[in-house]
Every structure is written in structure tokens, then in C-alpha cells.
Image (cartoon, rainbow, N blue to C red):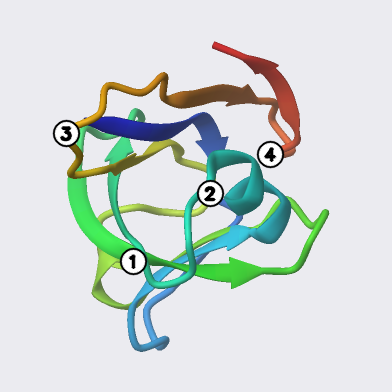
Amino acid sequence: MLKSKIHRATVTEANVNYTGSISIDSDLLKRADILVGEKVLVVDNTNGARLETYAIEGPAGSGTICMNGGAAHLVKEGDVITIIAFEVTDDIKEPKKFLVDGDNKFLKDL
């Protein structure tokens, strides 16, 4: 089941030299109920790339969305992305879906 979606986030950095993952502002992680280390799907709305990685915590309130490691070759600074988390469950739940502005600040629930 879809668990959560951060829609139209702007990549603030792409760091090929980091060991992997996606750094996400911790305020956005909390709002989306995405745990540090949780697997996420990243969909690049700018170039169509799709990849799986895991979330790591970026500084609260910073708007940080940083693609790390090899994924930084596919998703570049300035790209607009959607970050999606799924959950294996027998329960049907309402997913947490929200839109962010150009600075990666919460804009509204979807």
C-alpha cells in the first residue's frame, strides 16, 4: 500500500561522493512518517528517472533534498521529484500525501 508521498520536492544537492541514499529535511520525514533507513522510491519529474534508495535525515527546517551516491548521476540539483514510501500491511490506511513549495516547505495536504 502507498504509505506516504512528498510531491514536487526540489533537489537541493546531488553528491556523487556520498555512499548512497537520499537526505531529506527531518521535518518532511516526520510529516511523511518516513523513518531513517526506510526504503523509498524516487521519481524524477524532470527527466523521468525512477530509483529506489533509503532515507537519511537532513537538518530540520533546511529544505534539504540531497541525492547521494550513484543516484546523483540520475537525479540532479534543481530536478523536481516525488518521494514515495510503501507499506506491507493487511490494513487499509489513508496515505500521507502532501505538496511542498519550491523551497521544500510544506504547502498543503493532497
**Which residue is identified by label 3?**
90
Q: Which residue is mark 4?
A: 104
Marks 2 and 4, Cα distance to the nearest angstrom?
A: 9 Å
Left or right, residue 95 beside residue 47? right
Between circles 3 and 2, the one closer to the viewer is: 3
What amino acid does circle 2 point to? Val
User: What kind of residue is marked 3?
Assistant: Asp
Task: Write down the quadrant of residue 1 in the picture.
Answer: top left
In this view, the residue in front, 27 or 75, is 27
User: Could you tell whether 99 is left or right of 48 in the image?
Assistant: right
Q: Position of residue 103 (x, y in %)?
A: 74, 38
**Badge nearest the viewer, 2 or 1:** 1
Q: Residue at x 49, y 23 (%)?
A: 97
Q: Are there few (<14), some (14-19), or many (20+) residues within 10 Å of tag 2?
A: many
Taking the spot 27% from the left edge, 63% from the top edge, the residue there is 53
Q: Is 46 rendered above or below residue 35?
A: above
* SS category of the residue bearing label 1: strand
The first of marks 3 and 1 along the sequence is 1
Q: Amino acid at mark 4?
A: Asn
**Which sits earlier in the primary sequence, circle 4 or circle 3?**
3
Q: Which residue is mark 1?
A: 54
Q: CA distance from mark 1 to mark 4?
A: 19 Å
Is 100 or 39 nearer to us in this picture? Answer: 39
Q: Earlier in the sequence, mark 1 or mark 4?
A: 1
How far, Cα to Cα, is label 2 from label 1?
15 Å
Query: From the viewer's perspective, is the residue at label 1 or at label 4 nearer?
Result: 1
Q: Alpha-carbon neighbours of circle 4 within 10 Å: few (<14), some, or many (≥20)? A: many
* Residue 56 x, y percent position in the rendering: 50, 71
- In the picture, residue 83 is in which quadrant? top left
